[in-house]
Image (tube, rainbow, N blue to C red):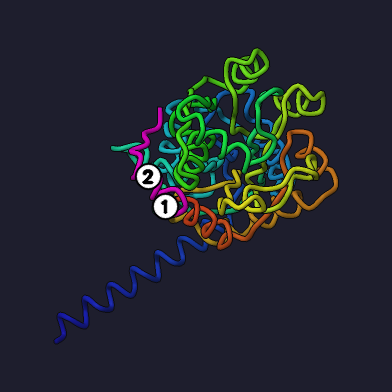
Amino acid sequence: MRKILTIGIALLAFAGVSATGSASLAAEWPKDKPITLVHAFAAGSDYLARLVAAALEKGVGQTVIVENKPGAGGAIGTGYVARQKPDGYTLVTAYPGPAANFANTMPGLPYKPLEDFEHIIQFSVGDMVLVARKDFPANNLGELIAYAKENPSQVSAGNNGIGSYGHMIETAIMDMASIDIKLVSYKGSPPIVTDMLSGSVDLSVDYLGDAYIKHIEAGTLKPIAVISAKRAKILPDIPTLKEQGLDLVAVPWGGIMAPKGTPPEIVKKINEVVAAYLKTDEAVQKFAMAGQIAAPTTPEEFHKIVVDEEALWRGIITKYRIRSE
């Protein structure tokens, strides 16, 4: 009995030391060294990451470095951060693929998206849009489905690669509407738009960004539906998929994560600083310039968003054996 009590006291003492160490670490953060925000994609795609990093730097009084670690659709940089010390000095931008869906589309992924991170905050949401070439013989979802059924395998749709958000949405639309569309993979939105303008591809599901907006405004491409829960502010007259009878809502998001075990006091501080910035007029305007909406959440809300994301696509990924390129 004495031996058991001794072990128990030792364990309690260890737990106390661990708790004290964690509290001490959180109290000192971020005095020791600069914070690194890893962006797991190439330079040029890090506009929002740099806005958030600048706000965090100002809010905590420590240098914040944005480090690009591209590769494998974001898996390399995200996996790197999963292996770092959970001390609040290494963070990573989070997006649906590497933070959630790669759990199902990348066999052998060297990290567990839903288990290896603390979800700190969502910082943005954007709109996906279903767009058609100007002279495509359908102006809404119902007409598109009817035309696709009358012309099986004759309608083509571009996307940013197998496993991309656009590819999965196109697959889900085919599955839910029982239609057969030829999916064509591209490396980026500009070549999709070029082929739509030339008439060599009929449709695209893609981010509603500059590549599409200018052509939609010019009338050289026509939007069929928005994939969000609500109509896009920039396209108030275009109904959502759900409004047109297809129960599918998919909203790409961006956020910040830290390695699992990062002290909750640090997670809370980062959340508070970034959330305060995202609520400013400056943030709203600058995010809008990138076709994004500043959308802060609590850590708990962001965690649920990531978990729900994986659950939303798991069935489609499994059924069609989707594997990220």
Question: Compared to 47, does 197 lie above or below?
Answer: above
Q: Earlier in the sequence, mark 2 or mark 1?
A: 2
What amino acid type should be assigned to the residue bearing mark 1? Leu
In space, the residues marked 2 and 1 are separated at their CA atoms by: 8 Å
Contact check, label 2 and label 1, Cβ < 8 Å:
yes
For image coordinates 60% across by 38% down, the residue present is 34
Horizontal and vertical percent for residue 68? Answer: 55, 27
Question: Compared to 283, does 148 lie above or below?
Answer: above
Q: Is residue 316 magenta?
A: yes
Horizontal and vertical percent for residue 310? Answer: 44, 50
- The residue pinned by badge 1 equals 114
Horizontal and vertical percent for residue 200? Answer: 58, 15
Q: Is residue 207 visible?
A: yes
The magenta-colored residue range is 311-325
Q: Secondary structure at mark 1?
A: loop
Magenta-drawn stretch, dominant element (helix, strand or loop) = helix
Residue furthest right in the image = 281
Q: Residues within 10 Å of mark 1 (few under 14, many from 20)?
A: some
Give the side of residue 290 with respect to residue 21, left or right: right
Q: Secondary structure at mark 2?
A: helix
Q: Is residue 36 visible?
A: no
Residue furthest front in the image = 150
Q: Nearer the viewer, residue 157 or 192?
A: 157
Disc assigned to residue 103: 2
Question: Compared to 220, does 247 lie above or below?
Answer: below
